[in-house]
Image (spheres, rainbow, N blue to C red):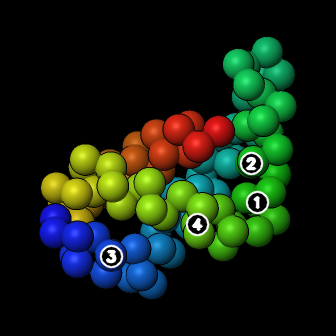
Amino acid sequence: MTYEESAALMKDAAFRDRIGIACLTYARYITDEAPTTAAHSTRIRWAQQTLVSPDVAVQQVTPTVVMDGAVQQDGAAISDANLQVAVETSVNKLL
């Protein structure tokens, strides 16, 4: 993707909505983790905040998600499964 295409994707409402669902999916997963999971307190705090305010999470992770290799390759056509991986990888980088 060009820089212009990447910038447009960061602002694409439908793509951002998909990122939001992926964030909520990951937040739900994290809330079910064992307390012994590495960095659990940081992860659970992010998950709880995401469940309350998913739009904040979307705003925080979208730039990192858009720069993910799979997103750069497929753009908005990325599959839900691959987008989920990109979101989880991005969240883990930011935590």
- Upstream in sequence: badge 2 or badge 3: 3
Q: Residues within 10 Å of mark 2 (few under 14, many from 20)?
A: many
Q: Which mark is residue 40?
A: none
- Upstream in sequence: badge 1 or badge 4: 1
- Upstream in sequence: badge 3 or badge 1: 3
Instruction: Name the quadrant containing residue 24.
Output: bottom right
- Disc 1 from disc 4: Cα separation: 11 Å
Q: Which mark is residue 51?
A: 1
Q: Amino acid at mark 2?
A: Ala
Q: Which mark is residue 7?
A: 3
- Disc 2 from disc 4: Cα separation: 12 Å
**Residue 22 in picture, x, y percent from top left:** 52, 57
Residue 69 seen in render: yes
**Residue 65 in picture, x, y percent from top left:** 41, 56
- Disc 3 from disc 1: Cα separation: 26 Å
Q: Which residue occupies 83% across, 22% down?
A: 35
Q: Dot 2 lies on which element?
A: helix
Q: Residues within 10 Å of mark 3 (few under 14, many from 20)?
A: some
Q: Which residue is mark 2?
A: 47
- Upstream in sequence: badge 2 or badge 4: 2
Q: Dot 1 lies on which element?
A: helix
- Disc 1 from disc 2: Cα separation: 6 Å
